[in-house]
Image: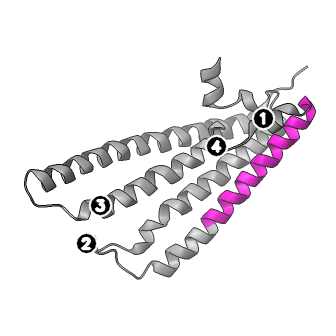
């Protein structure tokens, strides 16, 4: 007989679901803006013969701002890098423990990424990005945000590993598409 997920965990999970949705939506908007900027870069370079040089630097920031938070969403949706073949070869009870260990490791990785990226933000904060005039710290800020999101989503996954009646591979958006 399966036990229900505790109400507090269900509320926490719904809140993180909304945060995940907002993260992906903002990344989608940023991706559209990035494509528009690249179009403007090509138009400026080949039609106007006047390359807008600032776009290349903004594009780098946009790519980091898209990739890092969406990578954290991968922890929640369980499409992060993991080797499932080894886990699936183990007995069912052991699989849950391995999933739990992987989720703890993903949270620790996110915490380390946030911590040391913050150190980078502080270290390069006084320096300005040429052509943009903003702090160099903005280059590493998406890594801090992605690391913090990774920690939050890993905490959720650990709690679900412990309290959810569903097997770990049955959770997340990826599992919904497999049904």
Residue 109 part of the magenta segment? yes
Occupied quadrant, residue 60: bottom left
According to the picture, the residue beneath numbered tag 2 turns out to be: 131
Q: In the rendered structure, which disc, 2 or 4, sits on the residue that comes first in sequence?
A: 4
Q: Nearer the viewer, mark 4 or mark 1?
A: 1
Q: Nearer the viewer, residue 5 or 77?
A: 77
* Element assignment for label 2: loop
Q: What distance separates the C-alpha of mark 4 from that of mark 1? A: 14 Å
Q: In the rendered structure, which disc, 2 or 3, sits on the residue that comes first in sequence?
A: 3
Mark 1 crowdedness (10 Å alpha carbons): few <14, some 14-19, many ≥20: few
According to the picture, the residue beneath numbered tag 1 turns out to be: 85
According to the picture, the residue beneath numbered tag 4 turns out to be: 80
According to the picture, the residue beneath numbered tag 3 turns out to be: 56
Q: Nearer the viewer, mark 2 or mark 3?
A: 3
Q: Residue at x 77, y 47 (%)?
A: 102
What x and y, as percent, mark residue 163? Answer: 83, 36
* Element assignment for label 3: helix
* Element assignment for label 4: loop
Occupied quadrant, residue 31: top left
Q: Nearer the viewer, residue 176 or 17?
A: 176
Which stretch is magenta?
91-114
Q: Nearer the viewer, mark 1 or mark 2?
A: 1
Q: Residue at x 87, y 22 (%)?
A: 2
What x and y, as percent, mark residue 81? Answer: 66, 44
Q: In the rendered structure, which disc, 3 or 1, sits on the residue that comes first in sequence?
A: 3
Mark 3 crowdedness (10 Å alpha carbons): few <14, some 14-19, many ≥20: some
Left or right, 132 with respect to 84, comes to left
What x and y, as percent, mark residue 167? Answer: 80, 29
Mark 4 crowdedness (10 Å alpha carbons): few <14, some 14-19, many ≥20: few
């Amino acid at each position: 007989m399966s036990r229900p997920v505790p109400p507090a965990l269900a509320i926490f999970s719904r809140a993180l679901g909304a945060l995940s949705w907002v993260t992906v939506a903002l990344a989608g908007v940023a991706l559209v803006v990035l494509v528009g900027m690249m179009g403007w870069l090509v138009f400026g370079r080949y039609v106007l013969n006047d390359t807008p040089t600032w776009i290349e630097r903004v594009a780098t920031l946009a790519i980091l701002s898209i990739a890092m938070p969406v990578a954290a969403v991968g922890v929640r949706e369980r499409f992060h890098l993991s080797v499932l073949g080894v886990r699936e070869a183990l007995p069912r009870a052991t699989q849950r423990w391995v999933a739990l260990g992987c989720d703890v490791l993903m949270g620790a990785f996110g915490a380390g990424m946030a911590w040391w990226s913050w150190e980078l933000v502080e270290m390069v904060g006084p320096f300005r990005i040429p052509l943009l005039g903003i702090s160099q710290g903005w280059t590493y800020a998406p890594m801090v945000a992605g690391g913090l999101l990774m920690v939050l989503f890993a905490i959720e996954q650990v709690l679900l590993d412990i309290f959810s009646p569903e097997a770990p591979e049955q959770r997340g958006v990826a599992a919904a598409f497999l049904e």
